Image (spheres, grey):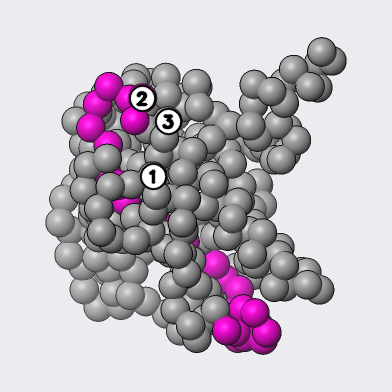
Amino acid sequence: MGEAKRRKSKDPYYGKIPKNIPERGIVISPPIVCDDNSLFVKSSVLDETELRFSLLYWDKLVWPSSNAVHMPSNDDAKFLEEIGVLTRPSYNFNGNLGHIIAATQIKAFRDLEAIEPGQWTMAMGENSLKINMSDFEKNEGALIELHRAIPIPTRDVPFNDILDFKERRKPELFALRHHFDQLLAEIHNSSDKQTILEKKIKEIDTACTDLLKVGREWQFPVYVSNLKASFSLSSRTLSHGAIGAWLLGGPLGLPAVSSALIGAALSTIEIKGDFGFRSIRRPSSPYRYTFKAHEEL
């Protein structure tokens, strides 16, 4: 058997995703809500489940601070700093504290994107950062949501177990990230949007199913979760033909994922309008990710 055939027989993703996928990074935060006139700090440390979600699906983590607001690293963050996974750059800003925290997170993201275009995103949601400010434009973005489709480690899973799993299951993790991140760009750039739409849904369905299957190998609890990604690609540019019908028609089923899970709730994927991030116009890469855990796998 030739080398290519041998690798194909052992790696189900051989030849289906790029051989050299660059490392991806995410800018993280403790659970904080910022708007133009107020600030609510739920916690000054990183949420334990959010941190494990970020560690599993991204390669580099950044938690920025500023001259005015610095939240010290706890033991979890210090460990990730020591092994080189987490870095903590500092910035200088003036103004009210809510503006400073939001500006620090956005500045870190933009600086990292300038160095490595398309490779960075921000963690935003109930357990990380929520920004209600003018940096985001209503109806100028698109949101993709996977419902009940991916595995997330629970808050008590040791970091070393997650790192070991990432090393052993790189193909499955890379496949989901690659197909999910490229969904809108491939549809947008195709002349046959209906065919590409069906192809991409199937690829994501398969990638999620494979991750859930290998998630059962873990010797620790795992949540079945939702995953949302926001793109600065206006949903109005996707409002024709197959994509328009999908936007109006609501969520579509992920049959392979649904079959792999026990329970009445279906797994689905949905695209709809969302906030866009000012000055970020790359449709191939999400600027924001968030997740919501459901039940244990």
SS under mark 2: loop
Q: Considering only vertical position in the picture, is 247 above or below 123?
A: below
The answer to which of marks 1 and 2 sits earlier in the sequence is 2
Q: Is residue 214 above or below residue 186?
A: above
Q: Is residue 216 above or below residue 276?
A: above
Please tell me how crowded label 1 is: few (under 14), some (14-19), or many (20+) other residues with Cα within 10 Å: some
Residue sitting at x 45%, y 64%: 253
Which of these two is toward me, 92 or 54?
54
Location of the N terminus by quadrant is top right
CA gap between label 3 and label 1 equals: 11 Å
Which residue is at the front of the view, 44 or 179? 179
| Location of residue 4 by image quarter | top right
The numbered mark at residue 214 is 3
Q: For residue 193: magenta?
A: no
Between 91 and 170, the one lying in front of the other is 170
Q: Which residue is mark 1?
A: 260
Residue 107 percent location from the top left of the image: 49, 57
Q: Position of residue 207 (x, y in %)?
A: 53, 44
Magenta region: 216-245
Residue drawn at the location 37% of the way across and 33% of the way down: 215
Give the amino acid type for the residue marked by disc 1 in the picture. Answer: Ala
Q: Are marks 3 and 2 in contact (CB under 8 Å)?
A: yes
**The residue under label 3 is which amino acid type?**
Val
Please state which amino acid type lies under the numbered disc 2: Glu
For mark 2, what is the residue? 217
Residue drawn at 24 percent across, 26 percent down: 220
What's the CA distance linking mark 1 and mark 2? 14 Å
Mark 3 or mark 1, whichever is nearer to me: 1
User: Closer to the N terminus: mark 3 or mark 1?
Assistant: 3
